[in-house]
Amino acid sequence: MDLNLQLVSNSNERAKALKAFDDTKTGVKGLVDAGITTIPQIFVLPNQKEEVSPDESNSGSSCFKLPVIDLAEMNKDYDCLHRKQVVEEIKHACETWGFFKILNHGIPQDLMDEMVEGVRRFNEQSKEEKMKIYSREKMRKVREIMMKYSYYVKKLGQTLFQLVSEALGLDPNYLENMECVKGQAFFCHYYPVCPEPDRKIGHAKHTDPDFLTILLQDHIGGLQVRHQNQWVNVPPERGDLVVNVGDLLQLISNDKFKSVEHRVLANSAGPRISVAFFFTTHFQESDKVFGPIKELLTNESPPLYKETLVKDYINLFHSEGLGGIRALDQLRL
């Protein structure tokens, strides 16, 4: 068979299988509840063997540990010694890791627990209840607890963007005035127990197409970050949050801060629950153009990227597909 015809045939079969899966309106958990013992082929990526290759050590490197930053007693006294130390820690983490954990961030522990439990309750409703509101295109109903959690995360985001601004050597309000904090999006993830975790990645390796992401995860774990060409585990600790640099922050910082690949391993334990809060204007109408910050440019450090609208970057990001050629590289000058 001609290779092109074979690819079309495989693509058509996959599309039919995906439609049949969507029509069940029960999601992946519906498959698990039905007692499957073998992963359907539609959930195995074309490059899945590379993702789960023993050469990449799925167990995670024990040689590295994600930076942990304590935000206790953080205030608006920009000359405070503690604040300067935190800014330096964030600068180092964003330059070398693109990820860091934060403690004493101001979000109540009971609210974080309720947020995780709310995601669990929704996903563990009966099939009949979920079918009433299930959709791949629309966000699920926002619960009251999500609104309360959102309030706290937005407030935390403002603090983080001030610290990141200072870490770039800019005025504390620079990134907020640039509208980096203007839009937000919630993504709640429920990863059911996987019957064959050695054959499947929970979430393929990717970067985030936003400015900054704040992640809440439960006790199961599975998140890995690529650092010095190794996958490093990010084990959850009660009370902490994970923060990572997005592609758009790498772009406007002109590569001073790095947006790095990360992934989630499938797990035979669980379910795993996480809540990702993205700072992006993707879901707001905006004609704001983003490019390398002019104050960071010199003759020795010229702009490395073209300017872009957020919506155009998101379209570029989705066109590449997870595991494909990185969208950010397509904007590189």
Image (cartoon, rainbow, N blue to C red):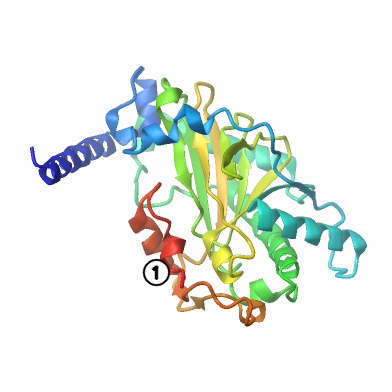
Q: Nearer the viewer, residue 249 or 162?
A: 249
Reply above or below: 319 against 8.
Answer: below
Q: Residue 131 appears at what percent x and percent y?
A: 33, 37
Which residue lies under the disc numbered 1?
A: 312
Q: Report the amino acid beneath label 1.
A: Asp
Residue drawn at point x = 34 percent, y = 40 percent: 132
Residue drawn at point x = 39 percent, y = 54 percent: 325
Answer whether residue 118 is visible to the viewer in this image.
no
Q: Nearer the viewer, residue 147 or 266?
A: 266
User: Of all residues shown, which one is farthest toward the left?
Assistant: 1
Q: Residue 114 appears at what percent x and percent y?
A: 64, 38
Q: Residue 226 appears at what percent x and percent y?
A: 57, 44
Left or right: 69, with 302 as reference point = right
User: Of all residues shown, which one is farthest toward the front?
Assistant: 300
> Which quarter of the rendering shows the N terminus?
top left
Left or right: 146, with 200 as reference point = right
Answer whether residue 232 is visible to the viewer in this image.
yes
- For residue 159, which quarter of the picture? bottom right
